[in-house]
Image (cartoon, rainbow, N blue to C red):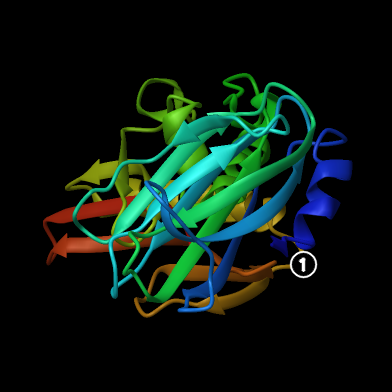
Amino acid sequence: MRVLFFLLFISTVIFSQPRVEYYTSSGKLEESDQVKKDFGRYDGYELPVQKGEIVHIFVHSGEFEPLVALVNPDGEIYSQGDITGNGYSYINAEIPVPGEWLVYVIGNEKSMGEYTLNLGFTDKASVKFDDKADFCGKLNYLFIHAKAHFIFANEYGNLEKELNFEGMQAKIFDPENISYSIVFYHGNKFARAKNIYDNYSSKVDECLKGWKKEKGEKKNSVVYSKKLNESNMKIAIWLNEIQQGKEFEVSVDVSGK
């Protein structure tokens, strides 16, 4: 049985401030691993968690069809993913009681091979989007959740309906690139676009003191970056010329991988 030591830190501090954590671990089902009849070959992980924590558990393998199961301290299966046929299985669950929980990565009796286990953690206070927060508070919410690929924000925070910035014209979620784009202008007036770009550039710069700041690939663009745990966070503000001299867009993009 393996112990996920890095989770001990999460369990002790997650309730002191809004927090989202996301970790990746690699494992391998081998011939020496235990096999149970009607259960299969499996790896087990001890998972120390607190009541009220929300967990996301995702396992992927290119060598066998995995199944993931979450077992409570009484030894009962609390939640179990599906065998998707696409090499992955996942669970989203809220923890009802504290203690030593178990995560099982399961294959059939003949399954062997490498897999990747992703674990995300947050709490109810951290998934709620505060529409009354200032610009920096809302931006902070997005980059914190970018660490966990926006899984919790979309699953529990209902960003499709609740995400709102003053002056926002549109929002675009790109799951493939793990990014949220907030569009503040889309139109044919460059002077208007440039004024909005300068305004939000100042706001973003004020929010991200201490982040690495670089000029973007395009003329009117700035990219901020920061390493948070295992995630490379990037926030960029752009004035895009979509159609030369005719169509412009100002957006703030938040991403994390």
Drawn side of residue 180 relative to residue 48, left or right: left
Residue 80: percent from left, percent from top:
43, 37
Question: Looking at the picture, which amino acid does disc 1 mark?
Answer: Gly
**Residue toward you, 143 or 117:** 117
Residue 138 vs 144, above or below: the answer is above
Residue 26: percent from left, percent from top:
53, 74
Residue 83: percent from left, percent from top:
27, 48
Q: Label 1's element?
A: loop
Drawn side of residue 77 relative to residue 183, left or right: right
Drawn side of residue 16 relative to residue 193, left or right: right
Q: Residue at x 41, y 51 (%)?
A: 37
Q: Residue at x 39, y 33 (%)?
A: 168
Dot 1 alpha-carbon crowd within 10 angstroms: few under 14, some 14 to 19, many 20 or more: few
Drawn side of residue 170 relative to residue 243, left or right: right
Q: Residue at x 24, y 44 (%)?
A: 186
**Residue toward you, 235 or 52:** 52
Q: How many marks?
A: 1
Q: Quadrant of the N terminus?
A: bottom right
In the rendered image, which quarter is residue 13 located in?
A: top right
Mark yes or no: residue 169 visible: yes
In the rendered image, which quarter is residue 248 located in?
A: bottom left
**Residue toward you, 153 or 199:** 153
Mark yes or no: residue 140 visible: no
Q: Residue at x 43, y 69 (%)?
A: 221
Pointer 1: what residue?
A: 210
